[in-house]
Amino acid sequence: MTLDVVNSDNKKIGSVDLSDTVFAGPVKTDLIWESVVRQNASERRGTHKSKNRALVSGGGKKPYKQKGTGRAQAGSTRSPLWRHGGTVFPPQPRSYDYSMPRKVERGALKAALMSKLNDNAIVVVDELKATEKKTKPTAELLKRLGATRRTLVVDVQLDDNFNHSARNIAGVKLVASGRLTARDVMDTTRIIATRAAIERLQEVLG
């Protein structure tokens, strides 16, 4: 299988061979799901917190005498049974981050790329560079390459001028190929990748 390689004017100038080990076979959606859930979990702040009876202020005085009132015995007004009391087993700050085997992460990325390839959503360009840090010409370049509402731009190493020019464009996300994840791929409608990025991804994922 091959993909056409275009220049900045969206004109074909060559092609790139796609490896069957990366861009062929069934799309394993379960791996994509696992990878996306793990990345979402790792970005949770986990700062939620409620107070237990040890942390609630007050309650140092016994509310009433031990016997003779006809009421249940109580030693503190901050018991979880009382209004304004502490919470039983309250949520505490924690990290939701967890790791997955590298093989699973790579399998998820391969599945995501295959899914976008089946949707004809991948455009391969020879290079992505800008002569100056200006948003307008970069936006016009991406529009010629078929950029849509959500576009993912992938390169081995992002050009500094292009990076500064494109990062202000709404709906455009720039990612280096070495940091690409399955969630990045699935959360987009168009992928614009350089030939070098496709070759690097095939080298790593193969």
Image (tube, rainbow, N blue to C red):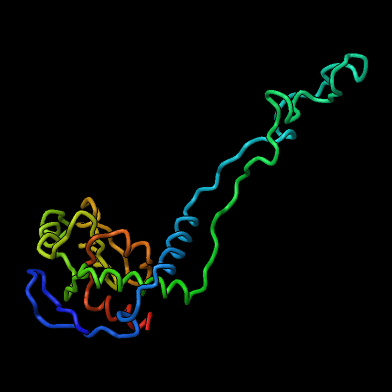
Which residue occupies the extreme top position in the image? 69
Q: Nearer the viewer, residue 177 or 92?
A: 92
The one nearer the camera, 46 or 24, is: 24
Q: How many marks?
A: 0
In the rendered image, the quadrant that contains the N terminus is bottom left
Name the residue at 34% across, 62% down.
Answer: 184
Residue 161 relative to residue 60: left or right: left
Percent position (x, y) of residue 63? 82, 18
Residue at position x 24%, y 72% in the image: 118
Q: In the picture provided, is 128 more to the left or to the right than 175?
A: left
Q: Nearer the viewer, residue 160 or 7?
A: 7
Is 75 rendered above or below residue 10? above
Relative to 117, say whether 206 is above or below. Answer: below
Q: Residue at x 54, y 47 (%)?
A: 46
Q: Is residue 126 above or below residue 99?
A: below
Q: Position of residue 29 (x, y in %)?
A: 39, 68
Which image quadrant is residue 199 in? Answer: bottom left
Q: Quadrant of residue 47?
A: top right
